[in-house]
Image: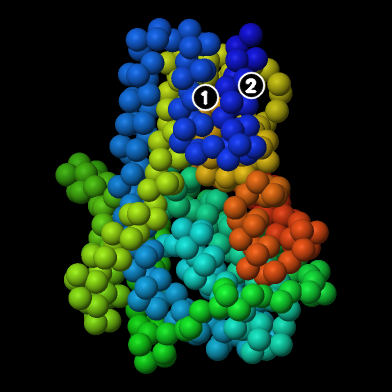
Amino acid sequence: MILAILILTILVLVLPISWAKVNTLLAFLISSILGAVLLGIPVDNIPLTIEKGLGNMLGSLAIIVVLGAMFGKLVSESGAAQKIATVLMRLSGKKYISWALMLTGFLVGIPLFYNVGFVLLVPLVFSVAHQYKLPAVYIGISLLAALSVTHGYLPPHPSPSALVPMLGANMGKTLMYGLIVAIPSMIIAGPLFAKTLRKIPSHPLETFTTEAMPDDKLPGTFNSFFTPLLPVLMIGLSVFLPLLSTGNGQMRSIFLFLAHPILVLLISLLYATFSLGIKQGFTMKKITSFYADAIKDISVILMIVGGAGILKQVFMDSGVNNEIAKLLIGLNIHPLLLGWLIAMAVRVAVGSATVAGLTAAGIVAPLVVATGVNPNLMVLSIGAGSLMLSHVNDSGFWMFKEYFNLSLKDTIRSWTVMESIVGSVGIIIILLLDKVV
């Protein structure tokens, strides 16, 4: 009976989003309330469950996502992303251009959210394709594979950042393992897979090309590389900082404070405000307007994340998550593979990688405690599943199709396969990592 209620709750979430195009937050609210009633939560307690779920989720995540969006916006507006691309392509030449675009997507994708990175960098792909007389899909898929791995695997992107506290993982270790998973995934799904796409015809629409900033207006090379990577460097160091305390409790507390993602992003943003803002001639008023736009851009994602928190709280308050955990443990499937499969199923149904990741995490969270599986790897396995089989209900699918002016068949052959390679290679590496960490 409980399993039937769970399936019905998920269907009430999935169908309005995928078929009726209902707002995702509204779908989460409707499915959460229905699930709460059917699972026996007293009706007078349901508003408290909603408030608790929304507050717990956004309380730990909202400021991280907002600071990350502000940071990425400045990287984009300052021209640092364009400078990174220019330098890498200058070093690579025509022979290795797809590798240069992959590195561009990876470096720029770390601070930028996926849709922002797509809109910012795809016009660059078109200009490079024109300059070198190369097929746009062939060179563009490498860049987009890199953007996908940062979106699915690496903090401070919304889904992995939200999954870390949900599953009791460590942000620094998740980032380190995420890099191990991301690099081979984007190489196989990017430059190697791209070799099979050389004959796909693509005539990008002029509407989607943009004017590049003049070279003399771009930040310096060191500044353009160092500033976007600063949060990654600091999060990476956070794994080792506590080890330097040598038994000093006060020093350890200071290191843990400085290693918190909120402090990491705040410090990075303050540095970027100077290095990519004031130093580039922007006034504080202009910089502030960039930050305001970034908050507007991220508001929808925050509400989706909050909605997922409500549904998770319904499962917790009703006790159904523990019942599901007992049932799933009996299936004799590796917990990491199970997390991947559930995330993939939701992704296919809903289309959104973020919704897929958060929904799957709410279902499998008790498994992490019950089985003792590595929570950092569970974050990544769910991320891998959430990238699988992108198709017609995914906005990214249609952005790729329309920007590159492709047929539906060629979009599936290139985009859908690329996303599935990223997710498939990812889970294989994650299962291998599970043997050694």
Looking at the image, can residue 230 be seen? no
Question: Picture quarter containing residue 333?
Answer: top right
Report helix, strand or loop for mark 2.
helix
> Callout 2: 10 Å neighbours few (<14), some, many (20+)?
few
Vertical side of 59 occupied by 179: above or below? below
The residue that appears at 64% across and 57% down in the rendered structure is 398
Q: Which residue is mark 2?
A: 7
Q: How many marks?
A: 2
Q: Amino acid at mark 2?
A: Ile
Q: Which residue is mark 1?
A: 31
The residue positioned farthest toward the left in the image shown: 250
In the rendered structure, the answer to whether residue 248 lies left or right of residue 337 reads left
The image position of residue 161, as x and y in percent, is 43, 46
- Front disc: 2 or 1: 1
Looking at the image, can residue 157 be seen? yes
Q: Nearer the viewer, residue 214 or 260?
A: 214
